Image: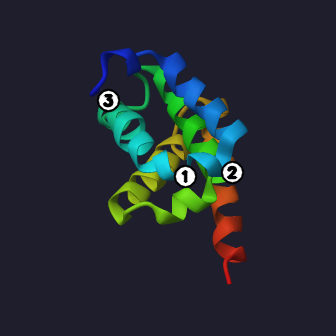
């Protein structure tokens, strides 16, 4: 990960809470959040579904909050960053722990509702 201070799973939960509370006002920072937090975690968890469970939960919750509360920023992301959001959701959906799988399924459902409602 880029910043040693971001190597704590609580940082992911902090950003998830910030996105939930401040949503649209953080749209301009969303690309940096994806690069520095989500992509870093994806690099750590993409090879298996077992290691670093606390980072997985925080990352999946962060993506869930982005989809639910920061949609303007989500749809303004560059294609590769948006693809990493989708990859994170897919990793969550394939997870062995039911509570993490549920986060992925709920996030994909929320994203699907957003896409269907866009004119």
Residue at (33% x, 60% y) in the render: 80
Tag 3 and tag 1, C-beta contact below 8 Å: no
Q: Which is more toward the observer, 68 or 88?
A: 68
In the image: residue 66, left or right of residue 11: right
Disc with the residue nearer the chain's start (3 vs 1) = 1
Q: Secondary structure at mark 3?
A: helix
Residue 35, percent across and down? 35, 42
Of tags 3 and 2, the one toward the viewer is 2
Instruction: Give the CA distance from mark 3 to mark 1.
Output: 25 Å
Disc with the residue nearer the chain's start (3 vs 2) = 3
Give the residue furthest to the bottom.
119
Q: State the mark number for residue 101.
A: none
Q: Secondary structure at mark 2?
A: helix
Q: Does the rendering let one see residue 76?
A: yes
Q: Which is more toward the observer, 1 or 23?
A: 23
Label 2: which residue?
68
Characterize the local packing of mark 1: few (<14), some (14-19) or many (20 or more) Cα atoms within 10 angstroms: many
Label 1: which residue?
27
Label 3: which residue?
44
In the image: residue 1, left or right of residue 81: left
Disc with the residue nearer the chain's start (1 vs 2) = 1
Q: In which quadrant is the N terminus drawn?
A: top left
């Amino acid at each position: 990960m880029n910043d040693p201070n971001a190597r704590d799973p609580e940082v992911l939960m902090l950003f998830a809470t910030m996105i939930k509370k401040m949503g649209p006002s953080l749209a301009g920072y969303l690309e940096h959040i994806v690069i520095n937090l989500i992509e870093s975690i994806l690099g750590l968890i993409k090879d298996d579904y077992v290691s670093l469970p606390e980072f997985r939960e925080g990352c999946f919750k962060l993506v869930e909050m982005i989809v639910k509360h920061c949609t303007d920023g989500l749809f303004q992301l560059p294609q590769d960053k948006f693809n990493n959001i989708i990859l994170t959701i897919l990793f969550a959906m394939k997870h062995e722990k039911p509570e993490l799988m549920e986060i992925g399924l709920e996030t994909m459902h929320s994203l699907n509702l957003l896409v269907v409602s866009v004119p």
